[in-house]
Image (cartoon, grey):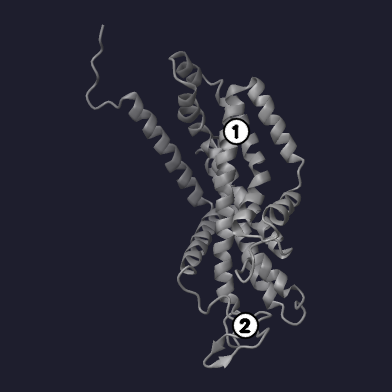
Amino acid sequence: MATAAVAGAPVFGETVVRRQTSLWADAWRRLKRNRLALAATFYLTFLLIVAIVSLFWTPYPYYEQAVKVNGLSVTSYDPPFKHLILGSDTFARDILSRLMVGARISLIVGLGTQVIVVTVGVVLGLLAGYARGVVDAVISTVINIFYGIPDILVALVLVLVIADGKPSLFFVIIAISFTRWTDMARLVRGQALSIREREYVEAARAAGARPRKILFGHILPNSLGPIIVQGTFGIPQAILFEAFLSFLGLGVPPPTPSWGSMASDGFHAIQIAPHVVLAPAIALSLTLMAFNFLGDGMRDALDPRQRR
C-alpha cells in the first residue's frame, strides 16, 4: 500500500544534505573556539594577502641592488629602520620586499605540493583500500618502496640530472611531491578499508551501485576529515623542505627570493648583521607554527568524538 508523503517533511536526500551541512557547521563552531587555530587562520589569511599583493607591488624591486632611498644608495647590512623597515641584505637589497615575494614562493610550494599529493594519494589510496587483493598488494609495495627513498636524494636527482642542474619552482614542487604522496595514500587506504565494510556501503553495493559511485559518493566524502587534516599538516612540511633545498642552493634560482635562500645568503654575516637571517627565519617559524596550530584545530574540530 502506498504511503502518502507528509507535507513539509524532508525527503531522505534532503536529510543527508542537512546532516552534512550540520557536521561542517558544527566543526566550524568548534574551530572558532580554539584560539590558537583562530589566530593561525588570521595570520595565514594575512600572509596570503601579502603574497597576492607582492604580485603587483613591493616597496622596492626585490632584485634591485643598492636600492635608493631619498636619492641615497643603501649600503649592505643596513640595520632595520635606518633607511629600510627591515634593513638590507648582503647586496643592499630591501629585505621586506624580498620577504613578501618569499611568502608567495612558500605558499606556492606548500599548496602546489599538496594538490599533487592529495590527487595522487587519494586516487591510489581509494583503489588500494576498495579493490584489495592484487591491486592493494601492488600499491602497498610501491608505497613501501617510496618510503625507503630519501627526500633529499630525489631532489638531487630531479634538480641535478633531470633539470640539468638548473633548479626551478616546478622541479622543487615535483621533488617534494614525489615522496610525500605516500603518507596520504596510506591514510586514505586505511579509511577505504574501514568504510567499505560499513552498512550504507553494503546497501549501496547490494542496490547495484557501481564502484565509481561507491568510491566517490560514499567512501571519499566520509574520508574528507582526515584528508583535510593530513593535507594541512603536509603544507608546512613542504615549505620547510623547500627552505632546506634553497639553503643548499637547490631551490628557486636567484634572484627570486625564498625564505631558505635568504637565510643562506645572510648566514655568513650572522655575527655582524643578524637581522638578515632573523627576518626570514622568524617568518618561516611563524608560518610553520600557524599551519600546525590550524591542523591541530581542524583535527579536533572534525573529530566526531569531540562533538558537544
Q: Amino acid at mark 1?
A: Leu
Q: Is residue 114 above or below residue 194?
A: below
- Residue 262 is situated, as x and y percent measured from the top left of the image, at 66, 70
Query: Which one is in front in this view, the residue at disc 2 or the one at disc 1?
Result: 1
Q: Is residue 4 above or below residue 123?
A: above
Q: Nearer the viewer, residue 252 or 221?
A: 252
Can you identify the residue that label 1 sits on?
124
Rendered residue at 42%/42% (across/down) = 25
Rendered residue at 66%/60% (across/down) = 167
N-term-proximal mark, 2 vs 1? 2
Quarter of the figure with residue 250: bottom right
Can residue 34 be seen? yes
Residue furthest front as drawn: 164
Q: How many marks?
A: 2
Q: Amino acid at mark 2?
A: Pro
SS type, badge 2? loop
Q: Quadrant of the N terminus?
A: top left
Rendered residue at 53%/39% (across/down) = 225
Q: Is residue 133 above or below residue 306?
A: above
- Mark seen at residue 191: none
Quarter of the figure with residue 40: bottom right
- Residue 45 is situated, as x and y percent measured from the top left of the image, at 49, 60
Q: Nearer the viewer, residue 281 or 248?
A: 248
Q: Nearer the viewer, residue 65 or 202?
A: 65
The local crowd at label 1, few if under 14, some if 14 to 19, many if 20 or more residues have their Cα within 10 Å, is many
Q: Is residue 102 above or below residue 146?
A: below
The local crowd at label 2, few if under 14, some if 14 to 19, many if 20 or more residues have their Cα within 10 Å, is some
- Residue 49 is situated, as x and y percent measured from the top left of the image, at 47, 64
Residue furthest bottom as drawn: 71
Can you identify the residue that label 2 sits on?
80
- Residue 17 is situated, as x and y percent measured from the top left of the image, at 37, 33
